[in-house]
Amino acid sequence: MARILLVEDNEMNRDMLSRRLQRREHQVSLAVDGQEAIDKARAEKPDVILMDMSLPVVDGWEATRQLKADDATKSIPIIALTAHAMASDEQRAREAGCDDFDTKPIELPRLLEKIQRLLSSP
């Protein structure tokens, strides 16, 4: 079981993905914008963050940069979630500090594999 911070501003996406993760025994915390994600990551220290990149207040790119620049949160793996599937989008996410990248619509088995791989790496 992992503690996952799911950062998603779309209520339907947030609802569906959080329920699917909880059914697999993960503990899910939610944030609806980048600033809330930064605050919750600092307070809760999740095992992994699933970060939508198109967010209000502070976008996912900037939220990731801030989390990776902070000693308290830089070691938390971040998986970028985006509807943009271009290679340049993955490169941009990795440059912002994301540890992995996944496209929407989410394929749960693929996402779970990425989460597991990040959690099991030293």
Image (cartoon, helix red, strand yellow):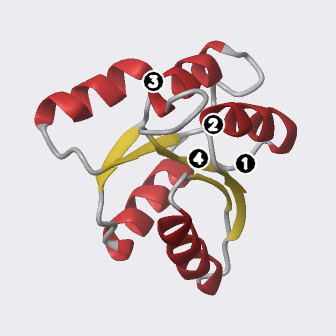
Of callouts 2 and 4, the N-terminal one: 4
Do the CB atoms of the residues marked 1 and 4 lie less than 8 Å apart? yes
The residue labelled by disc 3 is: 97
Q: Position of residue 22 (x, y in %)?
A: 65, 79
* Residue 33 shown left or right of residue 44 in the figure: left
Q: Position of residue 58 (x, y in %)?
A: 58, 27
Of callouts 2 and 3, the N-terminal one: 2
Residue drawn at point x = 13 percent, y = 39 percent: 86
Instruction: In this rendered view, identify the residue nearer to me: 56 or 1.
Output: 56
Q: Amino acid at mark 1?
A: Pro
The image's mark for residue 76 is: 2
Q: Amino acid at mark 2?
A: Ile
Do the CB atoms of the residues marked 2 and 3 lie less than 8 Å apart? no
Q: Amino acid at mark 4?
A: Ile
Do the CB atoms of the residues marked 2 and 4 lie less than 8 Å apart? yes
Q: CA distance from mark 1 to mark 4?
A: 7 Å
Residue drawn at point x = 13 percent, y = 35 percent: 87
**Mark 2: few, some, or many residues within 10 Å (few <14, many ≥20)?**
some
Do the CB atoms of the residues marked 1 and 2 lie less than 8 Å apart? yes
The residue labelled by disc 4 is: 49
The image's mark for residue 46 is: 1
